[in-house]
Image: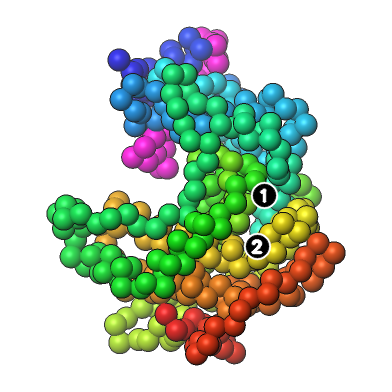
C-alpha cells in the first residue's frame, strides 16, 4: 500500500530519509496553493531560512509505480552522471530525494524566487531582460544536449519492469469524440468541439506539424509561466535571473515546442485581457485588450533573440524555426482550451477568441510572425545570417491580411 503523505507524517518521513533531524526546528505549512489534482505539495520550514518542498504524486499506474516523478528524477540523474551539463543545473531546482515506492519528491524551496506568472500579474510590467534570461537559459539547455546520443538514450530509461516510448510527440490533434462527452462537458463548451471539427485547415495544420516534429535535444515540455521562477533581486543580478522548475514532462523532443510553449504563455496574457462581448467583433476586441500585444512585443522579441544568440546553430538545421514556433504556440493555446474545458467546464466568448487566434497561428504562420513578434522573420534572424537562410515558402492565394497598423488578428 502506498504511503499517503500529510502534514502530520511528513516530518517523521523526512527524518527517516535523513533529510532533517529531531534537532532541527521544523514546522510545516498547510497545503500549498499550487497543489493540483495530480500532486500534493507541502512546504517544510527547517532551521534558519531553509525550506523544503515535498511533493507526492497522487496518480500512479496499476502497479503503483510513479511515472512523471520518475521522469523528473531521471533528469536530475542525467545532470549528476554527466558533469559537462553542470551549467544546466544552475537554471533548474535540483532534487534532494526521490522515494520511488511512494512517489515522493523533495527539493530545496527557492525562497528568493517567485513565479513569473504572479510577478507579471502583480506588477503589470514585462521587463525584456527577464524574457531574455529565459531565452538564454533555454538556448543553453537545447545547445548542450543537441544531437547527443548518450543523453537521448539516458532519458529513454524506464522504471524497473516498465516500458516507455523513447519519444513523445506533443503535436497531437484531438482524439475521436465519443457520446460520453455530452455528459461530461456543458453545452456551451461543446461549441469548442464543433468548431474544431469544422475547421479542416486546422486539423490539417496540426497533422502537418506532427509530421514535421523533429526530436533532437532535451526539452522541458511544460514551460508555462508558472514553471518559470524569477529572482527577487532580478534588477541587481547579471545572471541566475530565472529558474525552470517541474521537469516532470521533460523528454527528448523538438526545441520548437519549448519555444512555442513560452510564446503561448505571453500571448495568453494578451488574450485573457481582451474586452469580449457578443456585440463586439474580434478585431475590435483585440484592439481593446487591457494588455495590448504591443506592450508584450519587446519581451517576446528579446526572448527569441536571446535564444538564438545562445543557440544560433539551430538555424542551420531548422530553417523554418520561427514559423514552427508560431505554430506550436497556436497548438499550446488549443491544448490550454481543452484543459480548461476538462477541468473548469466552460468555454465562453473569450475562449472563442483564443481558438480563432490559435487557428490563425497554426494555419498561417508566415503571416502571423509580424503580429506575434512585432518584427518580420528576416529581421529576427538577420543578426544570425551566418547560420540562417529564409525558408522559401509558397505564397497562398486569396489570403486575408493578418495584421494592420495596430496589431490585430483577422481571417480566422
In magenta, the rendered stretch is 18-45
Tell whether position 269 is magenta.
no
N-term mark: 2 or 1:
1
Nearest the viewer among 111 and 139 is: 139
Q: Is residue 369 above or below residue 178?
A: below
Query: Picture coordinates of residue 100 (x, y %)?
Result: 46, 20
| Residue pictured at 74% horizontal, 60% vertical | 315
Give the labeled residue for mark 1: 138
Q: Residue at x 47, y 19 (%)?
A: 160
Please tell me whether the stretch drawn in magenta is mainly helix, strand or loop: loop
Q: Residue at x 76, y 59 (%)?
A: 316
Dot 1: element: helix
On the picture, is 325 further left or further right than 357?
Answer: right
Instruction: State whether residue 252 appears in this view.
Output: yes
Q: Quadrant for residue 146, please give it.
A: top right
Coordinates of residue 15 in the picture (x, y in percent): 49, 12
Amino acid at each position: 500500500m502506498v504511503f499517503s503523505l500529510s502534514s502530520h507524517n511528513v516530518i517523521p518521513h523526512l527524518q527517516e530519509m535523513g533529510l532533517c533531524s529531531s534537532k532541527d526546528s521544523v514546522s510545516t505549512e498547510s497545503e500549498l496553493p499550487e497543489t493540483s489534482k495530480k500532486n500534493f505539495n507541502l512546504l517544510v520550514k527547517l532551521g534558519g531560512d531553509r525550506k523544503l518542498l515535498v511533493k507526492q504524486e497522487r496518480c500512479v499506474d496499476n502497479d503503483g509505480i510513479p511515472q512523471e516523478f520518475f521522469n523528473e528524477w531521471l533528469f536530475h540523474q542525467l545532470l549528476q552522471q554527466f558533469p559537462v551539463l553542470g551549467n544546466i543545473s544552475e537554471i533548474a531546482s535540483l532534487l534532494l530525494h526521490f522515494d520511488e515506492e511512494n512517489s515522493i519528491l523533495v527539493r530545496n524551496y527557492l525562497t528568493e524566487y517567485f513565479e513569473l506568472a504572479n510577478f507579471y500579474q502583480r506588477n503589470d510590467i514585462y521587463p525584456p531582460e527577464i524574457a531574455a534570461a529565459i531565452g538564454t537559459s533555454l538556448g543553453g539547455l537545447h545547445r548542450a544536449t543537441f544531437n547527443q546520443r548518450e543523453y537521448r538514450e539516458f532519458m529513454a530509461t524506464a522504471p524497473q519492469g516498465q516500458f516507455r516510448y523513447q519519444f513523445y510527440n506533443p503535436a497531437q490533434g484531438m482524439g475521436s469524440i465519443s457520446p460520453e462527452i455530452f455528459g461530461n462537458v456543458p453545452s456551451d463548451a461543446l461549441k469548442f468541439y464543433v468548431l474544431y471539427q469544422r475547421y479542416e485547415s486546422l486539423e490539417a495544420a496540426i497533422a502537418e506539424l506532427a509530421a514535421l516534429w523533429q526530436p533532437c535535444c532535451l526539452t522541458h515540455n511544460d514551460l508555462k509561466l508558472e514553471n518559470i521562477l524569477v529572482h527577487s533581486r532580478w534588477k541587481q543580478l547579471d545572471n541566475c535571473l530565472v529558474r525552470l522548475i517541474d521537469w516532470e514532462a521533460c523528454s527528448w523532443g523538438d526545441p520548437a515546442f519549448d519555444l512555442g510553449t513560452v510564446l503561448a504563455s505571453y500571448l495568453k496574457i494578451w488574450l485573457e485581457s481582451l474586452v469580449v462581448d457578443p456585440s463586439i467583433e474580434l478585431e475590435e476586441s483585440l484592439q481593446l485588450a487591457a494588455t495590448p500585444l504591443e506592450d508584450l512585443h519587446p519581451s517576446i522579441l528579446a526572448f527569441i533573440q536571446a535564444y538564438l544568440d545562445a543557440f544560433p546553430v539551430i538555424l542551420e538545421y531548422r530553417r523554418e524555426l520561427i514559423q514552427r514556433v508560431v505554430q506550436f504556440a497556436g497548438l499550446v493555446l488549443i491544448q490550454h482550451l481543452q484543459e480548461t474545458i476538462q477541468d473548469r467546464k466552460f468555454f465562453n466568448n473569450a475562449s472563442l477568441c483564443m481558438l480563432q487566434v490559435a487557428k490563425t497561428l497554426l494555419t498561417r504562420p508566415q503571416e502571423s510572425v509580424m503580429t506575434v513578434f512585432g518584427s518580420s522573420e528576416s529581421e529576427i534572424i538577420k543578426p544570425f545570417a551566418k547560420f540562417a537562410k529564409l525558408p522559401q515558402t509558397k505564397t497562398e492565394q486569396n489570403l486575408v491580411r493578418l495584421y494592420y497598423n495596430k496589431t490585430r488578428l483577422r481571417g480566422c
